[in-house]
Image (cartoon, rainbow, N blue to C red):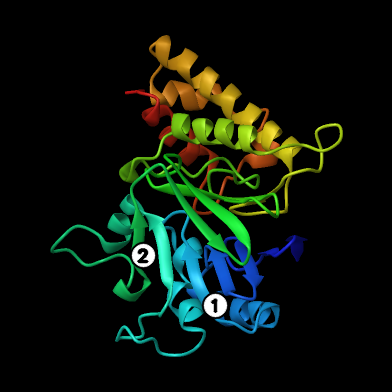
Amino acid sequence: MNVRGNVSMLVGAGGNVTVQAGDQGILLVDTGLTTMADKVLATIRPLSGKPVLYIINTDDRPDHVGGNVPLGNGGRAGRGGGGAPNVNIIAFVTTQAWMSGPVGQPSPTPEAAWPNDTYSEPQRNLHFNGEAVQIFHQTGTTDGNSMVLFRGSDVVSTGDIFDPTQYPMIDLKEGGSLQGVLEGLNRLKEMVVPENHFEGGTMVIPGHGRLCDAADVAVYQQMVTIVRDRLQYMIKKGMTLEQVKAAKPTQDFDPIYGNNTGNWTTDMFVEAAYKSLGGK
């Protein structure tokens, strides 16, 4: 679906894919699962007669980077050998490190899919298809999340910093934390500008789920703030992880964001959040 200006949002690829298309070519924020790449490619081809020139990865999860090679290739073998795509894959430097893995160990992600244009500064700027594109580093679910602002279109692509379908998926091994997610949401609240009665205005493409606006961001940020405050209070009281889980600090939000099954349950979120806030 077209969001505004040159920016569109694709759903159903595992994670949301943001597309900016124009006379210069196509820029993607995240690429979905590998298995969905053919469908994504068929959807974006009519948007521009030019190839994909930029891919921005907001983190290293398979539902965000799985289509890097096939979408970067546009269905063709790239010039880099082994099917490596002829495209700039941009990500924060630690995201590239997590995708490549420790030296001497098997890489969790195929080398052809690794970012080849990393940044280590707080912000990276591009100008593409007549529009300023700003990429912001933010420690959140990992230590290498990125958020992308399309200034001319007034659209923000957030990756998993903002995922209104569930509680934040905090990866402790990769430096993620509940406080980092909250700081990212606070930053996002400053970036979005509502139109009337706190709705409309800047459009927000989350990591998963429907198209959102400033009001949706505010609701999610408030939830994360409340859960953070409750956990900090319980930790200060000396409560163990088991005691915290028994107290159900997310109970009133579980009907909206909770999961008892799947790869990210409420129990997993509480444990990761508790540990990231210093709980023992």
SS at badge 1: helix
Residue tagged 2: 115
Horizontal relation, residue 122 to residue 102: left or right:
right
Q: Are marks 2 and 1 in contact (CB under 8 Å)?
A: no
Which amino acid lies under the numbered mark 2 shown in the image of this protein? Pro
Dot 1 amino acid type: Ala
In the figure, 31 relative to 92: above or below?
A: below
Relative placement, left or right, of 49 versus 82 is right
Q: Which residue is mark 1?
A: 37
In the picture as drawn, the residue positioned furthest to the bottom comes out as 76
Question: Percent position (x, y) of residue 186?
Answer: 57, 30
* Extreme residue toward the left, this view: 104
SS for dot 2: loop
The N terminus appears in which quarter of the rendering? Answer: bottom right
Q: Is residue 264 above or below residue 131?
A: above
How many C-alpha atoms fall within 10 Å of the one at disc 2: few (<14), some, or many (≥20)? many
Question: From where the camera sits, is residue 262 visible?
Answer: yes
The vertical placement of 244 against 190, above or below, is above
User: Foreground mark, 2 or 1?
Assistant: 2
| Inter-mark Cα distance, 2 to 1 | 17 Å
Q: At 33% across and 48% down in the image, what residue appears?
A: 120
